[in-house]
Image (cartoon, rainbow, N blue to C red):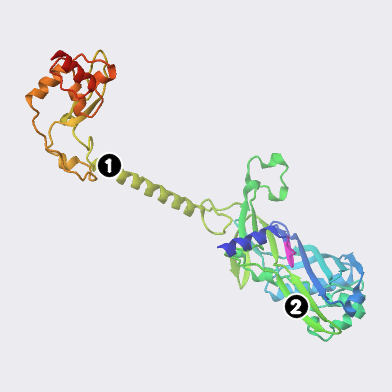
């Protein structure tokens, strides 16, 4: 879990350099729809120990860029190659218009040189509607792999093979790579979207936007082409349980000349954003992925970003959890009712209160304690930590009772181990029968005898 969390954090916080990025919106109600495909790659030439290659590239920085439309012969060749590849993939769709922009940038540094390649294709798709009736339209989605491995020259600039840029603009540097493993690394074509086609659309994230069928949508300037329709969206490119872990594609080669040099080509995972006007249900026809598009989703259909996982299943699981909770409280209530209720300890009717203080000379303390009326159940209620046996009770001599009454409680205080009230008052009001051990009481008894 720690590795997975770390991987997701890195993927989520890093800035990606996508190898191929598709953006397209298909309108089944029109004959053409626009698309945009971007291809990017970065090549590093590393010379950590310096050498002749470092001397050749030191301080250099240049950019080659340009644009061209369908009137350019090179763009026409690219259009033909892309349509041939789409047909080979089994799709009936074709590209009817194409514009190309490219940008290549070389920058030399102290320990390496980087070359950034970017080619952007913007065009128009046609013939993607397979059949159409009053209920739904079948559209072809098998055209996504816009790829060619041929050399494409536009205004004298070869835009598809990274090695050719070095051959045309840095011929001395090119000689270090010709005939080596680095030539294979730099010879990988740039215009390559095979991975976007190879990733099944069922693995892409699917969502649909119902804005077009909202009653108040027209008040917000809604685009007329989606009025009355929902919009289905499929996206790919991030690591997930369905798509798998998306990692950058790195190809590396080492060459030996006057110094060891390393050539590394880096392409991140591809990304796709495909939308269709209407609710799209995926299917396969003759090995080609298609979508059946309707203006609105079926009444009983609900979905989440996880694909075809119905929301009703989620609601059902929540309902089962609620039923389980109710059953738990019901069983708990029944158990409580079956338990014995009321006082569980000693019956209060079997307790009696005793006063533990006496008065003398107007001084009275209110202290008392509760005791059992008898010790019948004492062994059932006594503390398990009590190790001493109960003391035997003996009848006090009748003279003691008489002495307690005559001595105003002084003798009773002596028995409890407390200080005599007479000693506390500093005088004894008892008669000659007082048997208190306090000195003040002894002196009083002697004086009265």
SS at mark 1 in the image: helix
Tag 2: Cα neighbours inside 10 Å, few (<14), some, or many (≥20)? Answer: some
Which residue occupies the extreme bottom position in the image? 179
Labels 2 and 1 touching (C-beta < 8 A): no
Of 20 and 435, the residue lying toward us: 435
Tag 1: Cα neighbours inside 10 Å, few (<14), some, or many (≥20)? Answer: few
Does the magenta-highlighted stretch encompass residue 382? no
Q: Position of residue 442 (x, y in %)?
A: 19, 20
Residue 60, compared with residue 332, is above or below; it is below
Sequence-first disc among 2 and 1: 2
Q: Position of residue 365 (x, y in %)?
A: 27, 20
Badge number at residue 291: none
Query: Which image quadrant: the C terminus?
Result: top left
Of 383 and 141, the residue lying toward us: 383
Query: Which image quadrant: the N terminus?
Result: bottom right
- The kind of secondary structure the magenta stretch mainly shows is loop
Of 126 and 324, the residue lying toward us: 324
* 416 to the left or right of 16: left
* 8 to the left or right of 79: left
Q: Which residue is mark 1?
A: 336
Badge number at residue 252: 2
Residue 80, compared with residue 374, is above or below; it is below
Rounded to the nearest angstrom, the CA distance separating label 2 from label 1 is: 73 Å
- Residue visible at 13% across and 36% down in the picture: 375
SS at mark 2 in the image: strand
Q: Position of residue 274 (x, y in %)?
A: 68, 60
Residue 41 seen in render? yes
Q: Position of residue 9 (x, y in %)?
A: 64, 59
Query: Magenta stretch?
Result: 15-22
């Amino acid at each position: 879990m720690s590795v997975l969390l770390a991987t997701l954090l890195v993927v989520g916080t890093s800035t990606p350099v996508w190898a191929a990025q598709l953006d397209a919106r298909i309108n089944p109600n029109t004959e053409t729809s626009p698309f945009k495909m971007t291809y990017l790659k970065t090549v590093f030439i590393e010379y950590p120990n310096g050498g002749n290659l470092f001397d050749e590239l030191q301080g250099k920085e240049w950019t080659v860029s340009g644009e061209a439309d369908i009137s350019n012969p090179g763009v026409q060749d690219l259009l033909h190659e892309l349509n041939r590849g789409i047909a080979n993939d089994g799709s009936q769709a074709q590209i009817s218009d194409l514009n190309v922009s490219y940008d290549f940038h070389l920058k030399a540094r102290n320990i390496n040189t980087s070359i950034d390649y970017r080619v952007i294709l913007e065009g128009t798709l046609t013939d993607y509607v397979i059949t159409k009736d009053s209920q739904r339209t079948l559209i072809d989605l098998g055209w996504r792999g816009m790829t060619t491995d041929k050399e494409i020259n536009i205004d004298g600039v070869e835009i598809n093979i990274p090695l050719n840029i070095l051959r045309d603009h840095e011929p001395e540097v090119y000689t270090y790579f010709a005939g080596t493993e680095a030539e294979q690394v730099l010879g990988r074509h740039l215009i390559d979207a095979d991975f976007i086609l190879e990733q099944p659309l069922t693995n892409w994230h699917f969502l649909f936007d119902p804005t077009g069928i909202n009653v108040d949508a027209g008040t917000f300037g809604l685009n007329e082409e989606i009025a009355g329709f929902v919009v289905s969206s499929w996206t790919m490119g991030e690591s997930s349980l369905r798509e798998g872990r998306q990692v950058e594609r790195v190809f590396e080669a080492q060459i030996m000349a006057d110094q060891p040099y390393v050539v590394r080509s880096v392409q991140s995972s591809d990304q796709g954003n495909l939308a269709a006007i209407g609710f799209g249900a995926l299917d396969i026809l003759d090995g080609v992925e298609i979508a059946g598009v309707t203006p609105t989703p079926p009444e009983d259909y609900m979905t989440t970003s996880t694909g075809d996982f119905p929301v009703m299943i989620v609601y059902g699981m929540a309902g089962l959890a609620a039923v389980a909770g109710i059953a738990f409280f019901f069983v708990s209530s029944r158990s409580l009712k079956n338990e014995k209720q009321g006082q569980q300890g000693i019956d209060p009717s079997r307790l009696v209160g005793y006063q533990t203080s006496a008065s003398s000379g107007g001084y009275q303390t209110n202290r008392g304690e509760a005791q059992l009326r008898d010790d019948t159940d004492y062994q059932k209620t006594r503390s398990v930590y009590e190790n001493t046996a109960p003391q035997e009770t003996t009848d006090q001599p009748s003279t003691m009772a008489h002495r307690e009454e005559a001595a105003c409680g002084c003798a009773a205080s002596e028995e409890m181990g407390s200080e005599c009230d007479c000693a506390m008052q500093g005088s004894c009001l008892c008669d000659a029968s007082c048997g208190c051990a306090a000195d003040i009481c002894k002196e009083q008894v002697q004086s009265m005898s």
